[in-house]
Amino acid sequence: MKKTKIVLKCIDCGKEYEPAAIYRCECGGLLDVVQDIEYLKKNVSKALFDSRLKERKAPYGSGIWRYRELIHPLAGDADIVSRPEGNTNLYSHKKVREFAGIEDILVKHEGENPTGSFKDRGMTVGMSEAKRLGMKKVACASTGNTSASMAAYASMAGLKSVVFIPEGEIAYGKLSQALAYGSQVLQVKGNFDDAMSLVQESSKALGIYLLNSINPWRVEGQKSIMYEMLQQLSWKSPDWVCVPAGNLGNTSAFGKAFEDMKDLGFIEKIPRIAAIQAHGANPFYSMWKGNMKELLSVKHPKTIATAIKIGSPVSWKKAMRSIKYTDGVVEEVSDQEIMEAKAIVDSSGVGCEPASAASVAGAKKLRDSGVIDRKEKVVCIITGNILKDPDATINYHLSRIEGLKPAMPNKPTVIEPTLEAVRKVLG
Ligand code: F0G
């Protein structure tokens, strides 16, 4: 890689640091990776990124490292830990279009990443930085997907990993991945926010590298969801990007990605971000709606979408910056709305876990209220694979979710092992 200067800069006081194993400024503010725009202007182009599309192997075969200069120009080839990830598809389906009432709505399926969620995009970058810094052990708190991703990437990198998860609150698909990939799993008696506080304290005290999205390199990796989407759309911006919002890493990353794209002259128009929260875990929505200066935590978050069951999102300041920069909005949706949107995404053949469907439920709600126009181009991010949380899917179809009336249940039928029984059922 050619010479470039990268610093970690505090988003509150502006103090700059050399890249190191730090996540907050002395003043407590979050840190941003600040790229060298002059270097980038000379060293990247749409043609360069288009030329790398033919690559099949890591690093450039990865939908993250394809944009290497924009993400982590300091990482050498030997540092990079890649499956490779990214290269997720955009889908258009009549059912989704009709459900949302939007003529040109696409879903980008991040569940197609190696461990089944978008987390792999930030994790490949965070884990590569852990290697570059010579760290031996990594940790994260998680509602499930981050832990699954970190466990896999740590094993690939040959590092030890420890995950802090809220006891009894994460979907089995995700827990099974963390166990299988070989992480040490600590089940914290508390919720995600408790686990998040504990992992920050523990990693500082024990010298473990922290890989939650408070780590600014995770955010750099997740910018690639937007770079890749724009490249798939021949570098033409959609009007809107709808994204499920929990700990707010993606919302933060997307605004930063659009800033890069605009500063480099890759796009003229900045897509508007719609961050969608679950009603029972909606502190960011309340802050935006109430025009508040600070985020007020939700003490007891509650939603069927366990991935976004978060009351005190760490990255709210960065996320609010993204919403402001893109003239975006924040919306909330109920569990009923999430599960109906999921049933639509599922029955379109794409499929997703509950939290992911918040983006489609939010697009519909914003269309119904007239914020999004029927003619606008909308991309919804599907954040996780359908197999992550089979319990939610089955309980929906068997009408077993308390307080929820499924509109599209698809119950299995038990039959005797005879042709007659089959005839009777099939008619
Ligand atoms: N969707 C899924 C499937 C997730 O796993 C997450 C976050 C989100 C959406 C929210 O994204 O935090 O960037 O706003 N899961 C984290 C985890 C918190 O630990 O796996 P965000």
Image (spheres, helix red, strand yellow):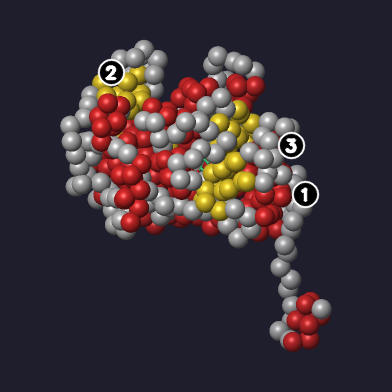
Q: Name the residue under label 3.
A: 368
Quadrant of residue 218 within the rendered picture = top left
The nearer-to-camera label among 2 and 3 is: 3
Q: Could you tell which of marks 3 and 1 lies nearer the N-terminus?
A: 3
Distance CA(mark 2)–CA(mark 3): 45 Å
Foreground residue among 289 and 153:
289
Of the numbered discs 2 and 3, the one sitting upstream in the chain is: 2
Mark 3 residue CB less than 8 A from any atom of ligand 1? no
* Mark linked to residue 111: none
The residue that label 1 is drawn on is: 405
Residue shown at the point (20%, 42%) measured from the top left: 76
Is residue 182 in view from this perspective? Answer: no
Q: Quadrant of residue 349?
A: bottom right
Q: Which residue is drawn at 71% across and 50% down?
A: 98
Say whether disc 1 or disc 2 marks the residue closer to the N-terminus: 2
Category of crowding for the residue at label 3, using alpha-carbon neighbours closer than 10 angstroms: few (below 14), some (14–19), many (at least 20): some
Q: Mark 2 points at which residue?
A: 16
Tell me the mark number nearer the camera, choosing from 1 and 2: 2
What amino acid type is highlighted by mark number 2? Glu
- Where is residue 220 drawn, in percent x and y? 36, 35
Residue type at numbered disc 1: Lys
Q: Mark 3: which secondary structure?
A: helix
Q: Residue at x 31, y 50 (%)?
A: 52
Label 3, label 1: how far apart the Cα atoms are: 21 Å
Q: Which quarter of the rendered picture does the C terminus lie within?
A: bottom right
